[in-house]
């Protein structure tokens, strides 16, 4: 091999070129390279072989380069370079030093490299130079070297990394509120260095990679001493202390926790009513829904519990980490104040003293509850608004439409019409326009009594006559057949009802309908029970055959007593005022006044007076007081009944034929047109048709 040529192996051609450049101390691009073997990676490591090159510095001339030059000795001779290379490769052995293969018998300067953490020396003279650097201690043949040193093959090279240690930082801080003691940790470290592998070089400076080992910043003894110095004695967390003393990363950890004071419970008010004026009722997926009952309006009756005050409760003191007590804040109190229509009892309970909608207001530590007696509904009552039911007065600016209900415990005022609807009021009903196909009930339960009284009176009369007729027939049969003859009185009563007393079943059905669903006290339930018993007794032919004269006598007495009780109900309040009524039913415990065209095919039952400034045509009137009507009946003979209590007066400017007037038990059929009629009973109890 020509002078200056070296043979080098590597995993790849590029690596072999790089190593050759390091050995010759030139740049890779300054080399003249001949690739002997490109090498192979094999398959899964099998058949792997290194790349082999022969390299020399590009500036050195070889025998072949001067062969053809006439001025150079040997020019024109056969190229000996290639033959020398081939002969060298075939005949000369190679020495292996790491990845570098050097020709035996050819000496070159010494060089050093680092491989697998070990410093290795190769070559001959002159010696190589090693510089230990800042991070390593270099020992050559057992001697510590302070600076750079010349080394040769055969020297014992030992490298020890320098050790750097930095202490951790920590700080214990007690929070301003005294509830936590926090430890801030920045761990220390111990740093050593690991030799990096380096390529062969005649001058080698050792280079390394740092290797850090984190060290805890604080010991348990140091931390406990600091806790004691800062007087941290409460809520010390042993697990947190253990974690802090072994922590190897920067962190903050709470090593002691105090006890926060338990806050007090301020006084509060529990409301027994919805604070919104209205709410929608929640329904299940499979529940049947009446959309007219979806809206609920809040109202209260007299005596209803509206609110309860819950007194304040004190809190409990806490504790700082230094053992100092932390007082809790004082609870806030609140005053429950009675407003209009309410009363506060013992400062704790608010109850309603009037009917209406509870209204809540709060100011300056006070809760004030008022009762608003009137519910104002602007617009129509329809499916959108739902039925309106309210304890108090109701004022409706629009109409009440089909199938809707308006129920109030006090007065109801309607600005429009009432059409095929129901209006019930505990007080009066005032309708500015018309009532068509509807039911009006004014006066609450008193209107029921007023409506039931004429029905009970007729029932008492019919039952008394039935009892008398059955008794007479029973006595006649025994006279003919003998005293031991057994007569089927029930069958006899059934025949009498079906043929002579046909009004009885309809009167019983009317009473049962009037009392159905009535709620109230003992007297109201007594009326309801009487209606049910009569309906059962006269409901079927089989039930009629179960009667006898004794049972009839008991029924008659019960009906007469209830009729007398109904007559004693004072006709106060429960008035109805409207402009016009058609196909409707009006029940009032007080009076009824019609200010417009009049009433057509309408039934009026009232405990007081009836005043109709227009026509009353078709239907019936049952009044507990006087009746004043401009015109009764029609020229076509519409059947019309006007009935008042005994001792009362019926006045009419005109009465058409086929009308019936009744005062108490006295009845008068009008067969001819009459004008300016005043019907009353004289001292003998006969009905007189006078003129006014």
Image (cartoon, grey):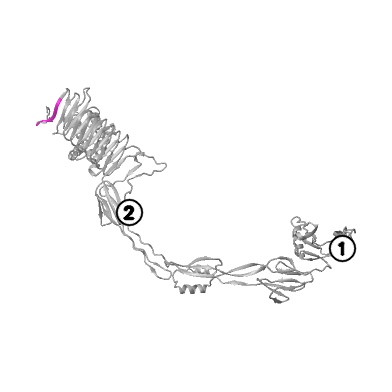
Q: Give residue 654's position: percent from left, percent from top.
A: 17, 26
Say which label, 2 or 1, has the lower sequence index.
Answer: 1
| Viewer-side label of 2, 1 | 1
Picture layout, residue 15 above or below residue 393 = below
Q: Give residue 133's position: percent from left, percent from top.
A: 67, 71
Tell me: 300 left or right of 51: left
Magenta extent: 675-683
Q: Give residue 226's position: percent from left, percent from top.
A: 48, 73
Q: Give residue 8's position: percent from left, percent from top.
A: 79, 62
Tell me: 611 left or right of 333: left
Q: In this orientation, which residue lies closer to the viewer: 646 or 343?
A: 343
Identify the image quadrant of residue 661.
top left
Neighbour class for label 2 at 10 Å: few (<14), some, many (≥20)? Answer: few
Picture layout, residue 618 above or below residue 183 = above
Does the stretch in magenta take in 679? yes
* Quadrant in the picture for the C terminus: top left
Picture layout, residue 177 above or below residue 533 = below
What secondary structure is the stretch in magenta mostly built from? strand
**Residue drawn 44% across the image and 72% down it:** 233
Does the stretch in magenta take in 570? no
Report helix, strand or loop for mark 1: helix
Residue at image mark 2: 270
Identify the image quadrant of residue 610.
top left
Residue at image mark 1: 91
Report helix, strand or loop for mark 2: strand
């Amino acid at each position: 091999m020509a002078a200056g040529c070296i043979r080098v192996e590597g995993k790849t051609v590029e690596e072999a070129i790089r190593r050759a450049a390091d050995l010759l101390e030139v740049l890779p691009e300054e080399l003249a390279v001949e690739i002997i073997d490109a090498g192979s990676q094999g398959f899964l490591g099998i058949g792997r072989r290194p790349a082999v090159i022969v390299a020399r510095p590009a500036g050195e001339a070889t025998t072949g380069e001067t062969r053809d030059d006439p001025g150079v000795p040997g020019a024109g001779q056969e190229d000996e370079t290639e033959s020398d290379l081939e002969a060298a490769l075939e005949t000369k052995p190679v020495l292996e030093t790491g990845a570098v293969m050097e020709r035996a018998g050819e000496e070159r300067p010494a060089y050093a490299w680092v491989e697998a953490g070990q410093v290795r020396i190769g070559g001959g003279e002159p010696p190589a130079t090693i510089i230990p650097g800042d991070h390593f201690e270099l020992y050559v043949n057992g001697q510590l070297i302070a600076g750079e040193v010349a080394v040769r093959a055969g020297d014992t090279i030992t490298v020890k990394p320098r050790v750097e240690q930095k202490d951790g930082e920590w700080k214990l801080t007690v929070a301003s509120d005294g509830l936590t003691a926090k430890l801030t940790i920045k761990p220390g470290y111990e740093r050593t260095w690991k030799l990096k592998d380096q390529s062969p070089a005649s001058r080698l400076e050792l280079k390394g990679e740092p290797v850090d080992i984190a060290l805890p910043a604080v010991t348990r003894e140091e931390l406990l001493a600091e806790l004691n110095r800062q007087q941290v004695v409460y809520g010390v967390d042993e697990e947190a202390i253990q974690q802090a003393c072994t922590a190897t990363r920067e962190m903050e950890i709470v090593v002691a926790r105090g006890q926060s004071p338990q806050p007090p419970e301020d006084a509060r008010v529990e409301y027994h009513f919805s604070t919104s004026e209205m709410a929608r009722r929640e329904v299940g997926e499979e529940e049947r829904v009446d959309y007219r009952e979806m809206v609920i309006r809040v109202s209260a009756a007299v005596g209803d519990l509206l609110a309860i005050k819950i007194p304040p409760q004190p809190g409990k003191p806490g504790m700082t980490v230094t053992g100092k007590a932390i007082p809790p804040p004082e609870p806030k109190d609140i005053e429950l104040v009675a407003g209009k229509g309410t009363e506060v009892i013992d400062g704790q309970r608010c109850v309603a003293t009037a009917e209406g909608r509870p209204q809540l207001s709060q100011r300056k530590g006070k809760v004030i509850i008022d009762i608003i007696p009137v519910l104002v509904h602007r617009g129509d009552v329809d499916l959108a608004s739902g039925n309106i039911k309210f304890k108090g007065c109701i004022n409706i600016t629009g109409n009440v439409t089909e199938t809707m209900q308006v129920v109030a415990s006090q007065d109801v005022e309607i600005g429009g019409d009432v059409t095929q609807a129901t209006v019930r009021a505990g007080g009066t009903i005032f309708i500015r326009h018309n009532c068509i196909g509807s039911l009006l009930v004014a006066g609450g339960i008193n209107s029921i009594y007023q409506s039931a009284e004429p029905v009970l009176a007729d029932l008492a009369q019919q039952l008394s006559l039935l009892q008398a007729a059955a008794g007479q027939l029973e006595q006649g049969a025994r006279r003919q057949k003998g005293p031991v003859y057994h007569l089927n009185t029930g069958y006899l009563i059934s025949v009498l009802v079906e043929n002579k007393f046909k009004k009885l079943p309809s009167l019983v059905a009317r009473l049962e309908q009037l009392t159905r669903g009535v709620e109230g006290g003992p007297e109201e339930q007594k009326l309801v029970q009487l209606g049910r018993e009569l309906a059962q007794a006269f409901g079927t032919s089989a039930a009629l055959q179960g009667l006898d004269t004794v049972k009839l006598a008991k029924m008659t007495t019960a009906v007469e007593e209830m009729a007398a009780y109904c007559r004693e109900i004072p006709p106060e309040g429960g008035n109805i005022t409207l402009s016009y009524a058609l196909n409707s039913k009006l029940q009032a415990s007080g009076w009824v006044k019609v200010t417009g065209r009049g009433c057509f095919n309408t039934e009026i039952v009232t405990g007081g007076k009836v005043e109709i400034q227009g026509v009353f045509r078709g239907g019936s009137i049952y009044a507990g007081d006087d009746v004043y009507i401009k015109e009764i009946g029609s020229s076509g003979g519409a059947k019309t009944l006007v009935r008042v209590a005994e001792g009362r007066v019926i006045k009419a400017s005109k009465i058409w034929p086929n009308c019936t007037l009744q005062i108490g038990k006295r009845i008068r059929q009008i067969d001819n047109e009459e004008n300016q009629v005043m019907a009353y009973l004289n001292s003998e109890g006969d009905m007189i048709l006078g003129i006014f």
